[in-house]
Amino acid sequence: MEEKINDMPIPFSQLIKELDLKDKATAYVLIEAEASSIPLIMEELSKIENVRSADVVTGLFDIIVFIEGEDQHEIGKIVVKEISPIKGVKKATTCIVVKI
């Protein structure tokens, strides 16, 4: 019995259909802040649902925040709409965690 081979490639969406894609996206947000605003910034960060941790550090950055989201787009929205507007945040650099 001859098997018929489909000439069309399998769409990527079909290949990953059965995979468990529940891994959330995570990122570190490196914040440059006005020194006098750091306590206020930390308080505001504690109110953001997606923030998993936030630490005041020494060096080039003042605060390092670890956030989690459904995907990289949600991470971007969190940084742009919730973290960057906090009074005293001068710059927020986002470092998306990659799995290799």
Image: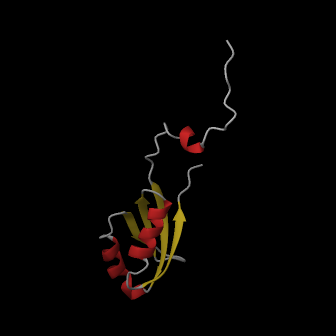
> Could you say where residue 16 lies in the image, as x and y percent from the top left?
53, 41
Q: Is residue 50 above or below residue 92?
A: above
> Could you say where residue 78 lies in the image, as x and y percent from the top left?
41, 69
| Direction from residue 16 to residue 22 in the image, left or right | left
Residue placed farthest to the top in the image?
Answer: 1
Which residue is located at x 43 percent, y 86 percent? Answer: 34
**Which corner quadrant of the image does residue 35 belong to?**
bottom left
Which residue is located at x 56 percent, y 38 percent? Answer: 15
Residue 64 in view of the camera: no
Which residue is located at x 30 percent, y 75 percent? Answer: 43
> Could you say where residue 65 lies in the image, as x and y percent from the top left?
43, 68
Q: Is residue 19 above or below residue 94?
A: above
* Viewer-closest of 98 and 58: 98
Residue 35 in view of the camera: yes
Which residue is located at x 47 percent, y 45 percent? Answer: 21
**Which corner quadrant of the image does residue 88 belong to?**
bottom left
Q: Is residue 85 above or below residue 3?
A: below
